[in-house]
Image (cartoon, rainbow, N blue to C red):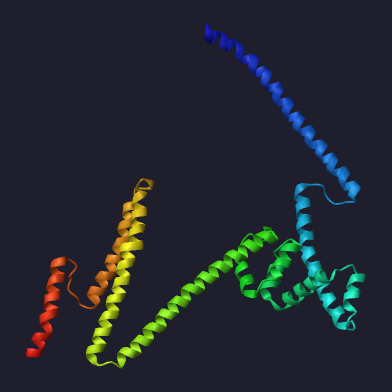
């Protein structure tokens, strides 16, 4: 009986849903019409004569945003020329007559002068939309501006977002410079050590080279046993993420093994990777010089 009752109710429910949906559509259309009428009334009040549509309005905003930056540059150029032609001491008063505060006039002049000299700033001036964002760019050096040219969404960034992006770029640049400085210092140290070793007697030179090679090997072992092993531990903890995780880990270890095998082949070296081989090589290293001296 419940099935029969449900079957009888279904047409009634459908009949109730359709009018409700139609009413919702009509209400939405009425709201849209009212919104458009309100917008047209505001346009008339503002003296706006363009199309009252979202797409057209956004295009117009973009156009006048670009014109705002252009206005800053053109005004800055004229202020620079006016300052050139004005007798000493009169420029500030002339700016005040034009409605410019001294600080604003100088910012516009700085923007025009720097854009004329910087190809990077000239390119960015055509990309940024707001006056505050453009004036923020003017305060930075050309290297920072060149890095900003690679940012895809710079046209949508505010002045505060540009400052944050520039701080990040500077931090990365400083970190890179620090790494390069350490690398260059290490290279310089190695060069000095090479020159020093070249002036040593053969026995001392050989001992110095061995010491340096041992130190380099210790650094490599430290990296493998420390950071590299920790990276493998982190990967091992994520084994459930994907079935190919072990393959990836094996690939990393395999690259190290391949490099070591290539070195062994290049210098025709025996494999003494296990403890017994290392002990044997230590014994050979002890009696080999004595045998050579006896011969």
Residue 247: where, in percent of width, then height?
31, 54
Which of the 4 image quarters holds residue 64?
bottom right
**Which one is in front, 58 or 242?**
242
Q: From the viewer's perspective, is residue 10 above or below residue 235?
A: above
Look at 33% across and 90% down and name the residue there: 196
Report whether residue 267 is seen. Answer: yes
Q: Quadrant of residue 105?
A: bottom right
Residue at 75% x, 50% y is 55
Q: Position of residue 78 (x, y in %)?
A: 84, 75
Numbered marks: total: 0
- Residue lying at 44% horizontally and 76% vertically, measured from the top left: 182
Can you give x and y, in whole percent of width and height, for residue 120 in the image? 66, 73
- Residue 295 visible? The answer is no
Seen from this angle, which residue lies furthest right? 97
Q: Is residue 68 above or below residue 20?
A: below
The picture quadrant where one finds residue 38 is top right
Q: Between residues 108 and 178, which one lies in front from this camera angle?
A: 178
Residue sticking out furthest to the left: 294
Q: Residue at x 77, y 60 (%)?
A: 65
Query: Is 205 left, or right, of 190 in this rendering?
Result: left
Along the horizontal axis of the image, is 150 left or right of 205? right
Tell me if residue 142 comes above or below residue 197 in the rendering.
above
In the rendered image, residue 156, in percent from the top left (x then y), is placed at 68, 58
Q: Quadrant for the C terminus, please.
A: bottom left
């Amino acid at each position: 009986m419940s099935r029969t009752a449900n079957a009888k109710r279904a047409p009634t429910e459908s009949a109730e849903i359709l009018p409700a949906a139609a009413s919702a559509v009509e209400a939405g259309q009425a709201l849209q019409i009212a919104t458009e009428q309100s917008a047209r009334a505001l346009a008339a009040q503002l003296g706006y004569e363009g199309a009252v549509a979202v797409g057209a309005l956004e295009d117009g905003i973009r156009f006048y945003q670009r014109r705002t930056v252009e206005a800053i540059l053109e005004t800055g150029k004229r202020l620079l020329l006016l300052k050139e032609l004005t007798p000493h001491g009169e420029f500030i008063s002339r700016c005040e007559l034009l409605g410019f505060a001294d600080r604003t006039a100088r910012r516009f002049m700085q923007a025009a002068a720097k854009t004329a000299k910087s190809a990077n700033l000239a390119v960015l001036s055509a990309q940024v939309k707001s006056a505050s964002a453009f004036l923020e760019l003017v305060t930075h050096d050309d290297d920072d501006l060149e890095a900003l040219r690679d940012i895809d969404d710079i046209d949508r960034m505010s002045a505060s977002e540009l400052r944050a992006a520039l701080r990040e770029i500077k931090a990365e640049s400083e970190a890179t410079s620090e790494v390069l400085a350490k690398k260059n210092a290490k290279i310089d140290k190695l060069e000095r050590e090479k020159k020093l070793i070249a002036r040593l007697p053969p026995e001392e030179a050989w001992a110095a080279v061995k010491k340096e090679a041992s130190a380099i090997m210790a650094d490599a072992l430290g990296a493998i046993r420390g950071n590299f092993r920790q990276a493998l531990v982190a990967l091992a903890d994520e084994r459930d993420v994907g079935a190919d995780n072990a393959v990836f880990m094996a690939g990393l270890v395999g690259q190290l093994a391949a490099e070591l095998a290539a070195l062994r082949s290049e210098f025709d070296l025996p494999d003494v990777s296990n403890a017994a081989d290392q002990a044997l090589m230590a014994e050979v290293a002890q009696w080999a010089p004595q045998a050579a001296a006896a011969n």
